[in-house]
Image (cartoon, grey):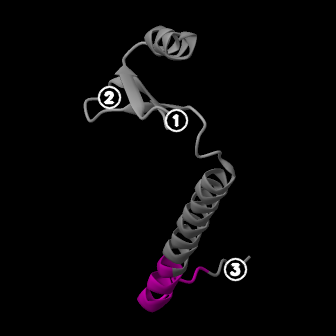
């Protein structure tokens, strides 16, 4: 029984690695395009006068909430979701 073992030349190894890197880059490109498309559609379909509430993370990893009412121009920010809900209720109560 003969075992034939052949080593790849260095050039082939580099080519294989670069094609793997390109596949990763293509995957990242598609993920970026998909994310951009989702954000674009969301922005396109949203009502500009609708109350906006979103969650953010600061550079220290702390999570907080922000709310903005385009109709009144008022905004609010808090680390508590309950506080934001109270602000919204008070905003529309009067």
Secondary element at tag 1: loop
Foreground: disc 1 or disc 3 = 1
Expressed as whole percent of the image width and height from the top left, the position of residue 9 reads 47, 89
Expressed as whole percent of the image width and height from the top left, the position of residue 19 reads 54, 80
Name, please, the residue furthest toward the right: 1
Secondary element at tag 3: loop
Question: Which secondary structure is most common in the magenta stretch?
Answer: helix
Name, please, the residue furthest toward the left: 60
Foreground: disc 3 or disc 2 = 2
Give the mark nearer the N terminus: 1 vs 3: 3
Q: Residue at x 48, y 80 (%)?
A: 18
Cα distance in 3D space between marks 2 and 1: 31 Å
Disc 2, disc 1: CB below 8 Å? no
**Can you identify the residue that label 2 sits on?**
61
Given residues 59 and 42, the one toward you in this image is: 42
The local crowd at label 1, few if under 14, some if 14 to 19, many if 20 or more residues have their Cα within 10 Å, is few
Give the mark nearer the N terminus: 2 vs 1: 2
Expressed as whole percent of the image width and height from the top left, the position of residue 39 reads 59, 54
**Can you identify the residue that label 1 sits on?**
71
69 vs 91: above or below: below
1 vs 66: above or below: below
Q: Residue at x 46, y 13 (%)?
A: 87
Secondary element at tag 2: loop
Q: Quadrant of the N terminus?
A: bottom right
Q: Residue at x 65, y 57 (%)?
A: 44
Q: Which residues are magenta?
A: 5-18
Q: Residue at x 49, y 10 (%)?
A: 90
Give the mark nearer the N terminus: 3 vs 2: 3
Residue 12 is a magenta residue: yes
Given residues 9 and 91, the one toward you in this image is: 91
């Amino acid at each position: 029984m003969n075992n034939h073992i052949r080593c790849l030349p260095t050039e082939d190894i580099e080519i294989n690695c670069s094609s793997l890197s390109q596949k990763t880059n293509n995957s990242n490109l598609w993920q970026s395009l998909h994310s951009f498309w989702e954000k674009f559609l969301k922005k396109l379909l949203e009502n500009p006068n609708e109350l906006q509430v979103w969650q953010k993370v600061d550079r220290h990893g702390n999570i907080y909430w922000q709310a903005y009412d385009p109709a009144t121009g008022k905004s609010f920010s808090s680390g508590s979701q309950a506080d934001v809900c109270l602000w919204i209720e008070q905003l529309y109560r009067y």
